[in-house]
Amino acid sequence: MTTPTGPSPAPTRVLVLNSGSSSVKYQLIDMADRSRLAVGLAERIGEETSAVSHQPLSTGGDKREWQGELADHDAALAAIAQELAADGLGLDSPELAAIGHRVVHGGLKLTEPTVIDDAVLAEIERLVPVAPLHNPANVTGIRTAQRLRPDLPQVAVFDTAFHSSMPEHAARYAIDVETADAHRVRRYGFHGTSHAYVSRKAAELLGKDAADTNLIVLHLGNGASASAVRAGRCEDTSMGLTPLEGLVMGTRSGDIDPAVVFHLGRVAGMSADEVDDLLNKRSGLLGLCGANDMREIRRRVDAGDPAARLAFDIYIHRLRKYIGAYYAVLGRVDAVVFTAGVGENAAPVREAAVAGLEELGLAVDGDLNAAAGKEARLISPASARVKVAVVPTDEELEIAEQSYALVTASPGPGPEGGAG
Ligand SMILES: Nc1ncnc2c1ncn2[C@@H]1O[C@H](COP(=O)(O)OP(=O)(O)O)[C@@H](O)[C@H]1O
Ligand SMILES: CC(=O)OP(=O)(O)O
Ligand SMILES: [Mg+2]
């Protein structure tokens, strides 16, 4: 057999950046075999105690961790680039095919993975007011990556994309249509990359065709959202115009009577920005009991702390309301699926979320639920009519898949493919 000679092989690696308000999660993935070459996290950006943890998986090297000050996202990306370069995986590598960015809000126009140009970046910036915790960090991540590799396609994959299939009766608020349309006030939904990925994996786990599968997907991380998925399409989701609506989250209130905002303005003299800050950053589990990490809340619940107990109960009550609502939206449910940090790890949350719902065909098996695992798995008894599943999300792989597919897509019939 001869070794073919000719041009060097096309690049197959994608660097995925998931920039949050104070952190950047990243993964370098080789799409030739979907292997992770490196994964890492820069956190507490903007504080003196910023930290980077980097795991070079391709070399089998040990995890490297250090603390120091990363003044801003620019500094964080420079540190990430340095860590990658130390393993011979630097951003200057000719093997990089694209950088894929998680972008939280794409609005009405950006509903597909998109190669970022000036107009796309301007649109992501225009949407900052409706994703104030997320889009600014996404913009910084994109700008810095563009500066480091101006020649490389930068691809945006939007959290809102999967939910753009929502029917109008789920996407619209019941407010004056002209006002809503003039200001594009409607429900967009978020965490869509996760809901899409987890829905596909859940159908596989159930051994069913996605086209014949109805799911309630519960993405419970720091931000949290539920979605009703019929045949692989989103029919409703709990987040709305912004990632504030819906479930109780780490620091966000989720659903409240909108009149709370006017009331606080009138009786507490709070400005719109102050209420925004209250509901996004000082509410949810943190506002209720002073902690937003479910592990700490469970420890305190087990120790008999009443504030933690009430916070947990409020969190669960809201979750159960959405399970009931989406059961009714879908009519028939094949599975309730838990994912993200809390959903994948917190057995007491999963147990409490479906406790007493046997009449709806829902139950968890105590042993299966308690067993830790990294794989997609069923935790309902074999006899359950509606399955309950834990499916680890993988937003980074999904972003890499979509970015790579976009930059390697055939541009249409060329000289070889044409009728000639
Ligand atoms: N073993 C665990 N038990 C309970 N909660 C956990 C566990 N591990 C992680 N979590 C929760 O997961 C949350 C983070 O989830 P994650 O999906 O990583 O969120 P995000 O992507 O929004 O940062 C943490 O705030 C923590 O409450
Ligand atoms: C949209 C959103 O809430 O994202 P995260 O959970 O990463 O904060
Ligand atoms: Mg997340």
Image (spheres, helix red, strand yellow):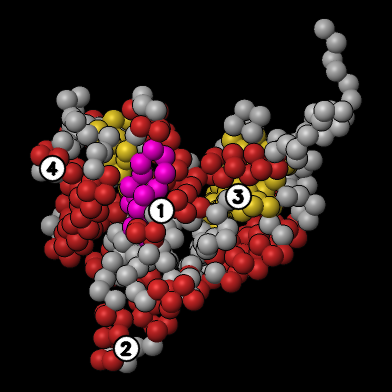
Q: Residue at x 26, y 49 (%)?
A: 329
Q: Amino acid at mark 2?
A: Gly
Task: Quadrant for residue 279, please give it.
Answer: bottom left
Query: Is 363 covered by the magenta stretch?
Result: no
Distance between the Cα atoms at labels 3 and 4?
39 Å
Q: Residue beneath label 4, please?
A: 357
Per the model, the C-alpha gap separating discs 2 and 3 is 39 Å
Residue mark closest to the camera, 1 vs 4: 1
* Number of residues whose C-alpha sits closer than 10 Å to that of mark 2, classed few (under 14), some (14–19) or many (20 or more): some
The magenta region covers 221-239
Real-space Cα separation, disc 3 to disc 1, in angstroms: 18 Å
**Residue identified by numbered label 2:** 265
Please give the name of the residue rendered at 41% of the width and 39% of the height, measured from the top-left corner: 232
Q: With 3 as the anchor, is 61 left or right in this view?
A: left
Q: Which residue is mark 1?
A: 166
- Circles 2 and 3, Cβ within 8 Å, touching? The answer is no
Q: Percent x, y for residue 356? A: 10, 43
Which residue is labeled 3 in the image?
Answer: 113
Q: Nearer the viewer, residue 264 or 334?
A: 334
Residue 125: x, y in percent? 60, 69
